[in-house]
Image (cartoon, grey):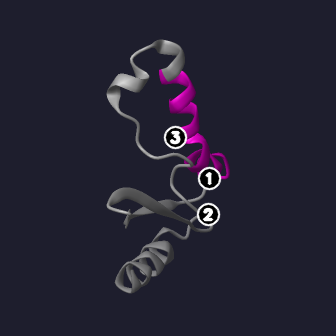
Amino acid sequence: MSTTPIRAQFLSSVEEDSAFHEFNGLVLRNPRVANMLDCPSISLPLSLDGLSAGLMLIGRRNADRRLLEIASSVETLL
């Protein structure tokens, strides 16, 4: 899945507390899934249209080493 459901925001767009909390909640939404399930995850950097993005892979609980092996293979393909 995508590491975050939104692209990075300019600092000027999150200067107000309400805007910061809204964007912060969105940025943490996808990684929160793995955290709540106590599963390892890793984000691989991608470049889409010249902008940074991330591809998050989630593994099974206690399978950190296997997830790193898979991530290494996926990174090679990307």
Residue 54 screen position, x and y as percent: 44, 59
Residue 25 within the magenta-colored segment of the rendering: yes
Q: Quadrant of the C terminus?
A: bottom left
CB contact under 8 Å: marks 2 and 1:
yes
Q: Residues within 10 Å of mark 1 (few under 14, many from 20)?
A: few
Residue 70 screen position, x and y as percent: 47, 80
Labels in figure, total? 3
Label located before the other in sequence (3 or 1): 3
Q: Which residue is mark 3?
A: 27
Question: Dividing the picture into quarters, in which one does residue 50 lie?
Answer: bottom left
For label 3, the SS is helix
Which residues lie in the magenta part?
Answer: 20-37
Q: Who's the residue at 42% across and 73% down the image?
A: 68
For label 2, the SS is loop
Rendered view: 18 above or below 27: above
Q: Which residue is mark 2?
A: 61
Residue 38 badge: 1
Q: Is residue 48 left or right of residue 61?
A: left
Label located before the other in sequence (2 or 1): 1
